[in-house]
Amino acid sequence: MKLIDIERISVLNIHYDNYSLDYFLDCQAKLGIKNVELLGAHQGLWMDHAGCQDAAPIRGKLEQRGLNCPVFTPENCCYGYQFAVKEPELVERCFRFFSNGIKFGAELGAKILGANSGWGYWNEPEEDGFKRSVEMLQRLSEVAREYDMLISCESLRPQESLIGYRLNQIRHLFDEVNHPNFKVMIDICAMAVSNETIQDWFDAFGATNIIHSHFQDGSPYGHLVWGDGGHNLRSMIEDMLKNGYEGLFSQELTDRKYFADPFYHDRRNMRNLRMYTE
């Protein structure tokens, strides 16, 4: 039963960490994927606080394969940059890093920059890290406006952040940033770990403000191939659609067991997704 067009499936390149960008793009083209979410500071997508590589050759690689990059996500979980950083000299480095991500993404044709709340320090009051995250994301939203992009913020897991792992925290962040270029995304893993539902998120934000999703299986932990976890794929797609969701269903597969042969696991994943895209 077709519920969505395959054009609404995108694949994040994180599980191709051991492979070249060309290999990842070739694999997606073979799968019939049209949209990819690219992770900055990985595999031929070099960027840091000082600058970024020329985007034109990468955009050419995409075009040659009939691919688009509607979402660009600078590394923001296991890299030396985060949104709630404390030290003044690092605040400016992080701002420049994510600003370069916006510029790089725009040059690739992206309209959305993937983000999260950051995490701050765990030995300080929660409101201190939260305040810094608000300030950083307000500044970056202004940069996003300049480049005609939107920032889409996801929640994290409680092991990753104390300031952005619950829906009410992301709603508070959204309200405090209070910028038309700052929106949110649903990450199924973080959502499920916090015992939240897709409906909870749409009740809190509405379809207008939920512009992207990391839409993968889990148990509830894990960013897994559909069928490797415990979620119901059909019902989750239906829950997104009945609430008027118009964004992508991006496959973020982070389990290390997928990294040795990511194309094999992408094929498994697509077999399940194609039940509802064909």
Image (cartoon, rainbow, N blue to C red):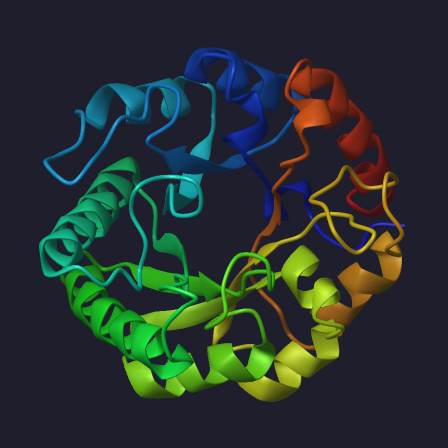
Which of the image's four quarters has the C terminus? top right
Q: In this view, does 142 lie above or below 35?
A: below
Q: Which residue is drawn at 85% across and 38% down?
A: 272
Report the side of 89 relative to 278 (left or right): left
Residue 113 point in image, percent of width and height: 35, 53
Report the side of 269 relative to 154 (left or right): right
Residue 227 point in image, percent of width and height: 88, 40
Q: Is residue 173 above or below residue 262?
A: below
Report the side of 19 relative to 274 (left or right): left
Judging depth in this view, the residue of 161 and 73 nearest the camera is 161
Q: Residue at x 20, y 45 (%)?
A: 97
Q: How many labels does the image show?
A: 0
Q: Is residue 129 above or below residue 54?
A: below
Judging depth in this view, the residue of 243 and 236 nearest the camera is 236
> Hey, which quadrant is residue 261 in on the image?
top right
Q: Residue at x 17, y 59 (%)?
A: 87
Residue 44 point in image, percent of width and height: 33, 19
Residue 237 point in image, percent of width and height: 77, 60
Note whether residue 178 is visible: no
Residue extending furthest toward the front: 123
> Hey, which quadrant is residue 151 in on the image?
bottom left
Judging depth in this view, the residue of 44 and 158 nearest the camera is 158
